Image (cartoon, helix red, strand yellow):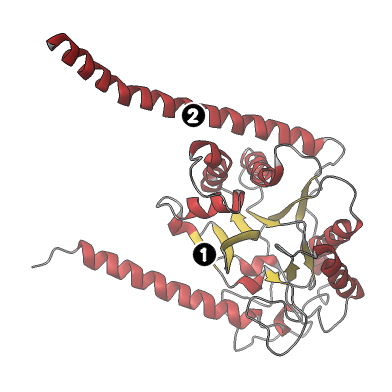
Amino acid sequence: MVFRTLRRRQFQKMIPQKNMKYRLLIFLLVWVLVIFLLFTARLTTNIGYPVSPIQHSIWEQNPELCRNPHHQVLLNESDYNDLSTVSTVRIGKVSILYGDPNPVYERALRTHEVHNRIHGLRQFVLREQVVDGVWNKPAYILSVLLDELLKPADARLEWLLWADGDTIVLNPCVPPAKFLPPDPAVHVVVAKDANGLNNGVFLLRVNAWALELFAGIIGYRHYRPDAPFVFQDQSAMEHLLLEDRFRPHVAYVPQRWFNAYHAFQNETLPPERIRRGDFLVHFAGRPDCQREMEYWLGVAERHAPDWELEFYRTGYPEEIVDFWNAWYSNTNAEINVREEEKTPQG
């Protein structure tokens, strides 16, 4: 009887050790998978699709394009939306377009190419499937991040702008640098829709924090298989951004800034729907996506002056100022609350 009790206790002590070994094995397997994906994604991207060099902004060659040639300091101008300068921030735009040839998606990509030339963005497009389904997206972003971080700091990109393949640029005059946060502690700028986080379009700072985030996204479904994955990689990103090590570095901005949804023009548009002068339109979850994209491609390819407004003529400058003023106000209030909680009560 004593012998059986002793064996049972020894077995119970072994269980945590086995669990620890199992978790360590899972962790190592996830990182092996990440390294494999990075290596494969780089090979796939470089075969037949060379990465374009950083282009000089057309604004530098023709200052009258997409800006006010007779600029004066406006009442709504601030450090957040300096309307008189061309940004020197190095930004790359990342997308995926693979599978059977699709003229609609190729035309959509060309609207981004025009925008890239105007603002000197480097374009990255994954043209071959590397892993299963939508998980190609975080794998490719992680690959681009790693490639950039291996470069000297003064040669690497500073930000990445991700854009899903079902997005169409309607106003190429909108500089993506205007959406960058004035707070250096913010590393990702993204929007939410009615379902929560939508990562169809977002801005990501190129740093070690971003590398850790996207390594976590890729491994999330393997490391936490019981977590809800309604929107797959998007759900993984949403869950991770709620964790303590990531949450303080996220800014959730108005959806219409760079992730507006399809709508036909009328006077009762919801706030997340596209309006004249807006940057782009995103067709997330649309059942008749291609037909709607063809309609908006017609708008984009006409280059209509009532859509391609100079940035200073859009509603963005005031909205950007109002948002970041509120951001700092809320952030300072949260800091004050935390400091009060730490102060011992006398």
Nearer-the-camera pick, 91 or 197:
197
Q: In this figure, which residue is indicated by the disc labeled 1?
A: 251
Quarter holding residue 265: bottom right
Considering every residue shown, the one lying at the far top of the view is 3
Q: Which mark lies nearer to you, 1 or 2?
A: 2
Quarter of the picture holding the N terminus: top left
Q: Position of residue 26 (x, y in %)?
A: 49, 29
Please tell me which residue is depicted at 56% across the width and 43% down the height of the picture. 211
Please tell me which residue is depicted at 79% across the width and 60% down the height of the picture. 116
Nearer-the-camera pick, 153 or 225:
225
Q: Seen in the image, is 65 located left or right of residue 233?
A: right
* Mark 1–mark 2 distance (CA, rounded to whole Å): 31 Å
> Does residue 40 lie above or below 327 as drawn?
above
Identify residue type, mark 2.
Answer: Ile
Element type where label 2 sits in the image = helix
Nearer-the-camera pick, 249 or 147:
249
Q: Position of residue 37 (x, y in %)?
A: 66, 34
Considering every residue shown, the one lying at the far front of the view is 1
Residue 7 visible in the displayed image: yes
> Does residue 322 lie above or below 126 as drawn?
below
Identify residue type, mark 1.
Answer: Ala
Residue 57 visible in the displayed image: no
Please tell me which residue is depicted at 55% across the width and 48% down the height of the picture. 210
Element type where label 1 sits in the image = strand
Quarter holding residue 290: bottom right
How would you rate the neighbour count of disc 2 (Cα within 10 Å): few for under 14, some for 14-19, many for 20 or more? some
Please tell me which residue is depicted at 53% across the width and 56% down the height of the picture. 187
> Does residue 272 lie above or below 53 as drawn?
below
Q: In this figure, which residue is indicated by the disc labeled 2?
A: 26
Quarter of the picture holding the C terminus: bottom left
Quarter holding residue 110: bottom right
